[in-house]
Image (cartoon, helix red, strand yellow):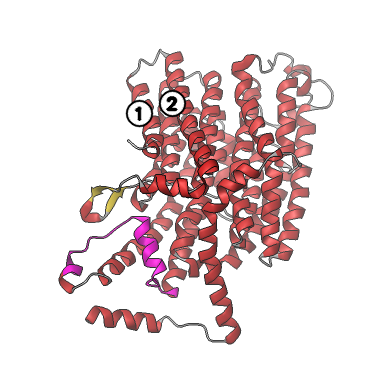
Amino acid sequence: MDVLTLLCVIPLAAAGIVAVMPATATKAIKGVATAASGLCLGIALYLFREALVGGEPALIALTESIPRRPWVESLGVSWSVGIDGMSVAMVLLNSIVMFTASLVSGHAIKDRVKEFMVLFLALGAGVFGVFTVKDMFFMYFAFELAVVPMYLLIGVWGSPKDREYAAMKLTLYLTAGALVALVGLLFLYFETWDYLRSIAPSAEAAAQVLPSFHLDDVFAAADSGFFTRAFQVKAFAFLFVGFAAIIPMWPLHTWSPIGHAAAPAAGSMMHAGVLMKLGSFAVLRVAFPACPEGAAYWLPWVALIAMANIVYGGYVAMAQKDLKYVIGFSSSSHMGYTLLGIASVTVIGVSGAVFLMFAHGVMTALTFGLIGFFYDQTHNRWIPDLGGLSHQVPWVATAFALATMASAGVPGFANFVSEFMVMLGAWEAGYHWQAVVAVFGVVITAVYLLRALRDVFFGPRNERWDKLEDAKGVYQKAPFVLLLAILLFFGFWPGPMVRVIEPGVTPIVEKVAKAIEKLERERETGLLESDDANVEARENEEER
């Protein structure tokens, strides 16, 4: 079995092992989950090293060495996995968040541990699938595999006050988005089938051609010019809106903050750390290379919507009194920077967007893990009821202060480097006022995060919380130390991550950049290319 398939199989196998274990063996169950997450982290570190030492050629060689395994040949479904620099960064992110979340849940989850760990491992497997598979059917299947467990994790183990509403809203929004994206995927599927039949040597051979969900076939059809501009504009709209629901993009973002607030600590870590990254990744992995001219048409609107994410999300976060809602709306605001980097279609901007996905995932996993640590004792997230907690939990307060600095874009943390790259990319692409608004968004972020830090942890000692216990020992501190160390490591030395990501995004950027140049050239001359000629040529080919 190849190493990429192992990433998906290990969590599922561990979930199967946990499912047959006695429910009373909680320590063994938690040990299996942590061991499986640790194995996945080891594989991810191996892949990151291969990408760093061998570069993109090493990842291409690894991908090409893994055969395409037919699954349902008549429908064109096959199991096929592959990886590039962008995927390596996301695989590393998921493995880090999974491992640390398993450690956090080890002391936070007390009830129905067996069921929790089965769902947690299935969620991790689904995320690995989205990041590694090259078949659209299995990518969609993996996406749903990631969404369904989150519904149960929130609905069963979430905060009693709002877990049912939060779980239902999250599922409805993400399922609706997935259905919209499915329409776009089916557009690509049937249009690719037409392409495969058009290149058959004879009419008899064309009749025998099977369809394909494989991304290589989709991209071959796109590169050949078979996808008309009108088709790409339509397909990209469905793909982007569907995937944007999970980014989350304004105004489809309202499921996310309440999902953060209601989820248990480990669920919030996975939700904010990796689940929110699936949409941006899918846009770059599928929509950009399959519909470059569609992307060129819609990206100015994406850059505009990114501003709404940044500013609106920031101002709403500023008005919140629930600490988890503050971080939840902050996450929506930060995803605006990711959208802006993607819309820039520059190597530095898109690389910065992927880097920010990684940095933001680590930072939010750290933040929600820390909030969960004292919420499990206080059962209170209402900021006015807290205050002075640094007297009772000084270690947690220090770690939260560092996480706040990372989120606010303080130099020395990975978030600063990635956001700076996004702003440079936006300016290079000509989005000047958007880049200025993005800088202003950093100021908004600093205001609400520093205020929340002050109101929760500093000020007079609140005797109400004198019985709180601080993080003690290696087991409780380890996940937070690891996450902080990663943010600081890539903050002071971002070169390795940038070197891994850039070769993966460069071919995608070049393809869309060419489409943008073509569109601008035609607009300048007033001779926008019509798709009629392409359609007529295809009809003539089919008649022949």
| Side of 502 relative to 440 (left or right) | left
- Kind of residue sitting beneath label 1: Ala
> Is residue 78 highlighted in magenta?
no
Alpha carbon distance from label 2 to label 1: 9 Å
**Viewer-side residue, 56 vs 413:** 56
- Judged from the image, the secondary structure of the residue bearing numbered disc 2 is helix
| Side of 390 relative to 91 (left or right) | right
**Viewer-side residue, 449 vs 191:** 191
What quarter of the picture does the C terminus occupy?
A: bottom left
Rendered position, 243 above or below 448: below
- Kind of residue sitting beneath label 2: Ala
- Residue bounds of the magenta highlight: 205-229
Residue to which mark 1 is pinned: 13
Residue to which mark 2 is pinned: 36
- Judged from the image, the secondary structure of the residue bearing numbered disc 1 is helix
**Viewer-side residue, 300 vs 376:** 300
